[in-house]
Structure formats: C-alpha cells, structure tokens
Image: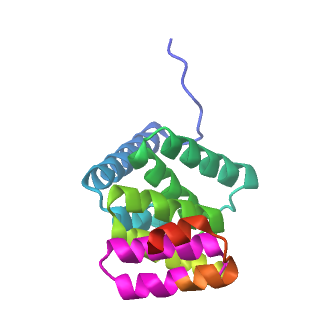
C-alpha cells in the first residue's frame, strides 16, 4: 500500500489540484527559459496565497537568491527574486539585488523597473543610485546615467565604484 498524503479532498479534486500545480510549474519554467521576467512576476503575483508570508519564508527566499547569484545560477536567482517580490513587493534589498541579477541576464526593462521601485523606497542610497546609473548606461541612456552617478556622489563623495563608472 502506498503512503498517500491525506489532504481532505476527494480523489478527483486532488487530481485536478495536482494537474493545476504541474501546469503552473510548467508555465513558470517556460517563461523563465524564455527570459520573460515581467510575465514570471505577474504569474507569481496571480498565484500568491491570501495568507501573509512569514518573515522566515521571505528571508529564506532572499538568502537563496543571494546564494544562487553568487554561484552564477542567474536564472534561479532571478526566479527566487520574482517569488520574493510576489510575496513582498516592497522588499528593498530584494528589489535592488534582483535588479542587479536581471541586469546580468540582460533583462534591462525588468532591472530598470525594480531599481526604480527600490529608489522609491530608499531614494538616498548611493549604492542604489550607482546601480541605477549602470542600468541606464546599459540601456544607452548615458545622460540619465550621469545624473544618477552625480546624485550618488553627492550622498557619498568617496564612492570609488561611481568614480570608476564615470571614468
């Protein structure tokens, strides 16, 4: 006899739920493989539960995303950031670090979007402004990048990375 997990649902309802979960995961994997990050974010937001996420879950997702990006697993890191931000759309560190990962993946529109959201939360963060400047530069908006770098230097005149980006 197989060990069956009791869910309280009839077999037909449980089967439908299982198929729905498989379809959801399949759709999510397809979007990630295609690099359609805004659609990944929308799908995750539409499927989030009504329950408030526990701080431990949010911290776990953030830490997993950081580890994945440090290990060069950028698609995994991006997906983890999407999951994190679907649960907590104003997670400042998730927005900034996620924008960096998206930039590395070449998803500049999503990177730009998340960095703007980060700067709405922390407008006086020189590191965030530097990140924003690099994203703008990658997008071919050098004049706007220069403004972002100058703002970062007003906050932190000794920020070496900004000086390097300006050189």
Seen from this angle, which residue lies furthest top? 1
Front in this rendered view, residue 158 or 73: 158
Residue 90 left/right relative to 101: right
Residue drawn 36% across and 82% down? 142
Examine the rendering and report whether any part of residue 13 can be seen: yes
Q: Is residue 127 magenta?
A: yes
Write down the quadrant of residue 159 in the picture. Answer: bottom right
Whole-percent x, y for residue 69 in the image: 49, 46
Seen from this angle, which residue lies furthest front? 167
Whole-percent x, y for residue 65 in the image: 55, 48
Residue drawn 36% across and 52% down? 28
Seen from this angle, which residue lies furthest right? 55
Examine the rendering and report whether any part of residue 47 can be seen: no
Whole-percent x, y for residue 11 in the image: 45, 37
Front in this rendered view, residue 113 or 149: 149
Whole-percent x, y for residue 122 in the image: 67, 78
Q: Is residue 75 above or below residue 116?
A: above
Q: Is residue 30 above or below residue 145?
A: above
Q: Main secondary structure of the magenta part?
A: helix
Write down the quadrant of residue 58 in the picture. Answer: bottom right
Residue drawn 30% across and 62% down? 36
Residue drawn 63% across and 63% down? 93
Segment tinted magenta in the rendering: 122-149
Q: Is residue 91 magenta?
A: no
Residue 165 left/right relative to 155: left
Front in this rendered view, residue 116 or 39: 116
């Amino acid at each position: 006899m197989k060990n069956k997990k009791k869910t309280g649902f009839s077999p037909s309802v449980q089967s439908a739920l299982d198929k729905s979960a498989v379809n959801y995961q399949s759709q999510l994997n397809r979007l990630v493989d295609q690099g359609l990050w805004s659609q990944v974010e929308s799908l995750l937001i539409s499927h989030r539960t009504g329950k408030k996420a526990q701080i431990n879950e949010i911290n776990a997702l953030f830490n997993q995303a950081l580890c994945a990006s440090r290990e060069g697993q950028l698609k995994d890191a991006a997906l983890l950031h999407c999951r994190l931000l679907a649960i907590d759309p104003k997670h400042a560190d998730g927005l900034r670090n996620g924008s960096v990962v998206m930039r590395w993946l070449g998803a500049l529109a999503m990177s730009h979007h998340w960095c703007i959201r980060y700067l709405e939360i922390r407008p006086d963060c020189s590191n965030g402004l530097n990140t924003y400047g690099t994203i703008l530069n990658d997008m071919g908006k050098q004049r706007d990048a220069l403004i972002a770098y100058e703002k970062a230097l007003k906050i932190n005149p000794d920020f070496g990375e900004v000086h390097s980006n300006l050189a």
